[in-house]
Amino acid sequence: MEILGIAAIRGGPVVSEPWKADWLRRIPAVNLIISCQELQEANQRYGHDRLVSAVQRHCHYLRTQILSAAHVEQIRPDDFAIKTICQHIVRILAEEIQPRLRPVINATGIILHTNLGRAPLAQEAIVAVEEVAKGYANLELDLETGKRGKRYDHLQELLCRITGAEDGLVVNNNAAAVLLVLSALARGRQVIVSRGELVEIGGGFRIPDVLEQSGAQLIEVGTTNKTRISDYEKAITPETAILLKVHPSNYRIIGFTESVNREDLVRLGRERGIPIVEDLGSGLLNGYDTSGVFFDEPTVQQVVRNGVDVVTFSGDKLLGGPQGGLIVGRRDLIAQIARHPLTRALRVDKLTLAALEATLQLYLHPDRVCEKVPIHRFINRKPDMISRQGQSFVDALQQSQAEITVQLLPSTSQIGGGALPEVELPSWSVVLTPKEGSAQTFAESLRQGRIPVMGRIQGEALWLDMRTLSTEEVAELGKLIIEAISKFKSSERGGSP
């Protein structure tokens, strides 16, 4: 096999500078690199074809570096040593087999970060998932009778006990839950909703679009900022199937406003024989917390007690479990929803059911939720506790590196996930300012590290909010920062990827 550099000269663009031609000849032949002892383990582990491909791509990278260099001083001789090349090849192959979906450290200050998977699971839920994942499970088997059962039976009793509803089921997310409820109860008929509640949430999910997909007819009442009970009364016809209430999880209208309270809407529904459906969104099950951040945020239990006939909410927001759309309410309406063909299309698997059941069981002991459910533990962390953890981290990091200025500064965290948009939690952040280069480049080095670290750029610094970091993650974070500094320095010098 020819040396790649010579082949490039013969078949590629004309190289006018003699020093470039000389460096192109120094790129080792592909077969010479592959035969190195340092790559024999990689050959066994990844296979010959993948090894050859990685070597060819790295040689192409070296060739590009030579051809794009303005003068010979930009070429680093060490990059062309066989040992260095082999090290790069091993790293390239190791990175290629990493799963695309990976754990990350969330230091953004957003507790329910949609891009980062929202709520981390409680340890009890993790164990439950592992138990049912490693073998078979009685997903649709009644162990008492030995006959086929329903997957929703595993959660039905638990949902009723916690929420006070007569029945319940779960689908794959709350958008699906809303679509299913409207399809089952209102297809071909009218659904009345306030204009001030025609919300759009993440991913372009809009209530009017869901109504259209369900086959129901949207009847808007009131105005954006003011809706009265009389607006609903005037809009009711024999074709009205549902009075819909949508909790504005991710926004607030303030000032000259008026809305219909839940009790009045329920009273109207009872008088006219029309079911009330409420999309509660975030799914708060426990109003207990030490910071008061849930003040005025309704719990599912409160909504059920208020007489709402069907309630939908998320499993992976304030409930703190896996992604899911929970539906609770009147027994006859839930039965009608469960019979709809979409229910099968939107059903969840055994892993989601296991995680959700384990999470819901924690709510049987409300006083332990803030300890056991991670997002509630993060929300209720005291600023002085975060400050002590952050200061210890800063002190240790300052002693181990000199390339970056490290400070601990006050900051604010958010709930995120479209929940409680007005709530800001006082927190503390480790602030990293590179002495040379940009904060953006350093943030990229951390994001592309062995364990990705996500922070936020503010001014000329990278802010790492400590609120959501566990003790184990803080210990790992120091190592990752040191690794990122080394990578950052290399990238600033224009080193190999």
Image (tube, rainbow, N blue to C red):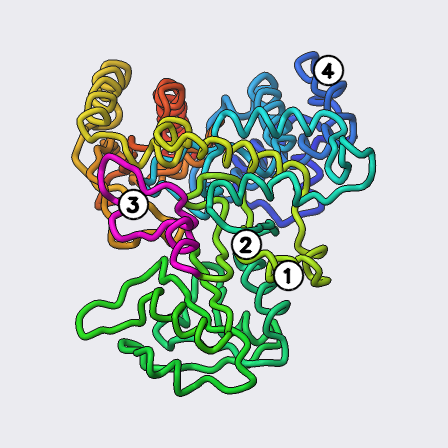
Q: In percent of the image, x 53 and y 38: which residue is there?
A: 66
Left/right placement of residue 12 relative to residue 315 reads: right
Q: Which mark is residue 337?
A: 1
Mark 4 or mark 3, which has the lower sequence index? 4
Q: Which mark is residue 468?
A: none
Q: Which mark is residue 414?
A: 3
Q: Which mark is residue 327?
A: 2
Q: Position of residue 404 (x, y in %)?
A: 25, 27
Q: Which residues are magenta?
A: 282-307
Res 49 quadrant in image: top right
Q: Position of residue 429 (x, y in %)?
A: 24, 33
Residue at the extreme front: 271
- Distance from disc 4 to disc 2, alpha carbons, whole Å, reads 56 Å
Residue 288 inside the magenta-drawn segment: yes
Q: Is residue 208 above or below residue 98?
A: below
Helix, strand, or loop for circle 4?
helix
Contact between labelled residues 1 and 3, with CB atoms less than 8 Å apart? no
Q: Mark 1 Cα within 10 Å, few/some/many (few <14, many 20+)? A: many
Task: Please state which of the two labelled residues, at mark 4 or mark 2, is closer to the viewer.
Answer: 2
Residue closest to the eye, 449 or 38: 449
